[in-house]
Image (tube, grey):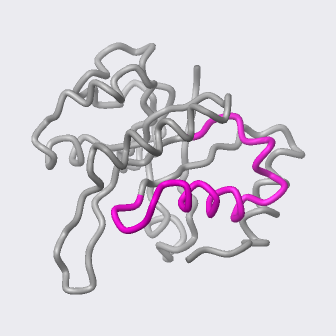
Amino acid sequence: RAAYDAVCEANLLDAQRVGMRTVGVICPSPWWDQDTGMREAQMRAGAAWAGLQVLEIDIEKFTRSDGTPVWTADAQNEEMLGLLEGTGKKVAIYTALWVWVAQGSPEWGYLSHLPLMAAQYDGRPDLTTVIRFGPWQLQGQIIGKQFTNSQEQFGDAEVGTGVTICWE
């Protein structure tokens, strides 16, 4: 389980001090209850939690220790969404076209009202290149794009930072 993360907190606080928008990306877990996941996200962010402007629900595929892929169930995603919306902060969905396709191009009615932060690692910091998918077809429904991932940028998937451009 997660614990207080001084580096995460310090990075977020530094960004907030210079006026950068800070976002919390929270991934519902298929293994434990979502209240625990929310508490752990708050613990990692520490004092910077209060200054996060946007919370993003991250729809992901996990891998069991035996290599079997596991998706979070809609019920788990809905539970986390309720917790995020209960904070009073702006909430968005963070996901990628490949995730949506891999899940069978679902309607995601409970998520479709959220703005999209697109995970599209094409190396192009250009918002006009965002590929629209699912219910996110209009420019106004997309609040940003992450154009490179942590591992490509820093050589370490655990860094937890990507290069992202946002707009509203």
- Which quadrant would the N terminus be assigned to in this image? bottom right
> On screen, 89 above or below 147?
above
- The residue furthest right is 17
Q: Position of residue 134 (x, y in %)?
A: 22, 27
How far across and down, in percent of the image, does residue 95 sit? Answer: 36, 43
Front position in the image: 78 or 106: 78
Above-or-below relation of 21 to 12: above
For the C terminus, the quadrant is top right
- Residue range (magenta): 29-55
Asked if residue 151 is among those painted magenta in the image, a careful observer would answer no
> What is the magenta segment's predominant secondary structure?
helix
The structure residue drawn at horizontal position 72% and vertical position 72%, both measured from the top left corner, is: 5
Instruction: Tell me the residue at 26%/21% (across/down).
Output: 135
Where is residue 137, by image quadrant? Answer: top left
Seen from the viewer's position, the closer of residues 93 and 125 is 93
Say if 54 sits above or below 48 in the image: above
Left or right relative to 3: residue 147: left
127 horizontally vs 21: left or right: left
